[in-house]
Image (spheres, helix red, strand yellow):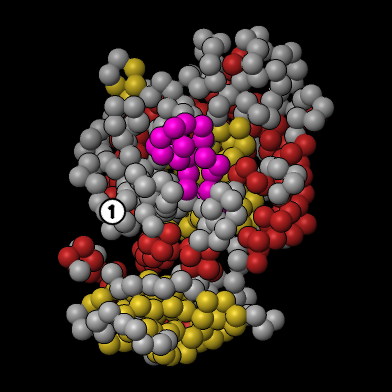
């Protein structure tokens, strides 16, 4: 209870959902899904998209690596061709992405493309590696090629994946000061111009950021990165001669720690799901400084909860389902959040190594294990249910993600060793909320019957 009391406004908001008429309220937030490896593998693409659609998700995010979709990426010498024309690239360059775009278009799904590094070696300043100091001019030409090929079917873009992380852009620091914020600004401007200058894509949404949530001696903190890219000092006052930046939305990866969604870092420049207000405040202060427009929306384009078998950063599979629901409830309660995403359908394959840290150093945020077994979060993603103990009451928030229209969902409770009993039938067209008396030793679950008659049962959920 002590952690949740710090988020009292959210509990109050949820309590308001039980007012007359509120049970049929629905969130306008878009749900997105990312399964990057599977969607670019011919053997898994269609089955994965089938699964995502059956979960009620119609939007996909896909990373487009410059190095992967390019020409002679390991050469120090730039190939002599028109890099802004997709038809001038080597045969087969675009095949994997072509098939994904074709499939999502055929299914009526929306696709977000994140154009990002690693980059061709010839596109870097020193012609070595695939991360450090890529050329904004050459990046802009490559983005023009991507937009020329896919712009008629894509209208949501983002520029660079986690540019404040050394795996994607560097060097993060130079002479002890952050280097990537100013570099990223140039890359963003080049990419944004390439997209919006293309006929038919003038009104496309281009997202700034895609920032990682933490900061340290290797990673520039997200808010420090934001200030650096917008030429603001630590007090969010304008410095230098930077012009106002066009920003259709801010993309962020609000991963939390093992402590759960309510975790708030002591570092005020870090932003996890439990401290989104830091990001909205920073964007508002940047707007007051004249660097961006007011009211910039937030897109949580990558999010997940790490679970076992990673026992260092992960939580139990049951707790993963609970934390995901709480996270989504928190995102839904923030009116600035336009999109909430699930990262991974299946956990990453274990890596080589003798220790657990070595083997499970990837992402175990999937709804399935790497072997394909469903975790509790699988059904929990379709029927997220978050329960907050609030005095002598429980406040419940949930949604029926696969539902296409108004539907009914049954909320059940189990106390101790007793069987499951119905708490209430709720009619909803999206999200719903209700309040009921708290009982010691209880757990909840949601049950929903699909239009085809099959029944979906959510995981056991404890109050927090």
Q: Please state the horizontal and vertical placement of residue 270, each as a whole percent of the image.
A: 29, 43
Q: Quadrant of residue 94?
A: top right
Q: Is residue 391 above or below residue 209?
A: below
Tally the marks: 1
Residue under circle 1? 259
Does the rendering let one see residue 93? yes
**Residue 59 located left or right of residue 452:** left
Residue found 38% across the figure and 72% down from its top: 461
How dense is the environment of label 1, judged by Cα within 10 Å: few (below 14), some, or many (20 and up)? Answer: few
Q: Is residue 414 above or below residue 89?
A: below
**Residue 350 located left or right of residue 80:** left
Asked whether 14 falls inside the magenta stretch, the response is no
Name the element at disc 1: loop
Residue found 56% across the figure and 33% down from its top: 116
Residue found 29% across the figure and 31% down from its top: 216
Q: What predominant SS class does the magenta segment belong to?
A: loop
**Residue 234 located left or right of residue 185:** left
Asked whether 345 falls inside the magenta stretch, the response is yes
Q: Please state the horizontal and vertical placement of residue 234, each as a whole percent of the image.
A: 23, 35
Closer-to-camera residue (174/36): 36
Q: Is residue 403 above or below residue 124?
A: below
Locate the C terminus by quadrant: bottom left
Q: Please state the horizontal and vertical placement of residue 332, each as a whole percent of the image.
A: 41, 65
Closer-to-camera residue (60/392): 392
Locate the N terminus by quadrant: bottom left
- Please provide the residue range marked out in magenta: 343-364
Does the rendering let one see residue 32? no
Closer-to-camera residue (125/286): 125
């Amino acid at each position: 209870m002590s952690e949740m009391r710090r988020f009292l406004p959210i509990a109050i908001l949820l309590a308001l959902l039980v007012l007359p008429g509120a049970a049929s309220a629905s969130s306008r937030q878009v749900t997105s899904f990312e399964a990057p490896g599977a969607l670019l593998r011919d053997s898994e693409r269609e089955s994965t998209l089938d699964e995502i659609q059956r979960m009620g998700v119609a939007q996909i995010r896909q990373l487009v690596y410059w190095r992967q979709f390019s020409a002679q990426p390991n050469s120090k010498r730039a190939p002599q061709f028109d890099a802004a024309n997709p038809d001038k690239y080597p045969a087969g360059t675009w095949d994997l992405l072509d098939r994904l775009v074709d499939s999502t278009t055929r299914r009526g799904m929306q696709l977000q493309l994140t154009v990002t590094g690693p980059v061709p070696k010839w596109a870097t300043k020193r012609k070595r590696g695939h991360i450090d100091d890529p050329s904004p001019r050459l990046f802009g030409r490559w983005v023009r090629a991507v937009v020329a090929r896919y712009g008629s079917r894509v209208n949501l873009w983002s520029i660079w994946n986690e540019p404040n992380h050394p795996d994607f852009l560097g060097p993060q620091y130079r002479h002890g000061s952050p280097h990537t914020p100013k570099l990223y600004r140039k890359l963003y401007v080049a990419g944004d111009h390439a997209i919006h200058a293309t006929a038919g894509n003038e009104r496309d949404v281009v997202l700034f950021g895609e920032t990682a949530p933490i900061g340290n001696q290797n990673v520039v903190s997200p808010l420090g990165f934001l200030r650096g890219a917008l030429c603001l000092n630590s007090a969010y006052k304008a410095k230098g001669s930077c012009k106002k930046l066009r920003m259709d939305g801010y993309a962020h990866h609000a991963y939390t720690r093992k402590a759960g969604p309510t975790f708030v870092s002591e570092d005020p420049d870090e932003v996890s799901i439990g401290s989104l207000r830091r990001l909205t405040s920073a964007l508002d202060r940047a707007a007051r400084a004249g660097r961006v427009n007011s009211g910039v929306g937030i897109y949580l384009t990558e999010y997940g909860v790490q679970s076992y078998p990673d026992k260092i950063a992960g939580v139990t599979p049951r707790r993963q389902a609970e934390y995901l629901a709480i996270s989504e409830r928190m995102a839904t309660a923030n009116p600035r959040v336009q999109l909430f995403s699930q990262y991974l359908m299946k956990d990453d394959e274990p890596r080589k190594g003798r220790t657990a840290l070595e083997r499970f150093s990837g992402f175990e945020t999937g709804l399935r294990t790497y072997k394909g077994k469903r975790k509790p979060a699988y059904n929990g993603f379709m029927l997220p249910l978050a329960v907050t103990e609030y005095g002598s009451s429980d406040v419940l928030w949930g949604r029926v993600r696969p539902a296409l229209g108004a539907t009914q969902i049954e909320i059940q409770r189990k106390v101790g060793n007793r069987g499951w009993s119905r708490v209430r039938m709720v009619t909803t067209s999206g999200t719903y909320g209700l309040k009921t008396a708290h009982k010691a030793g209880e757990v909840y679950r949601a049950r929903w019957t699909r239009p085809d008659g099959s029944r979906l049962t959510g995981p056991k959920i404890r109050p927090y």
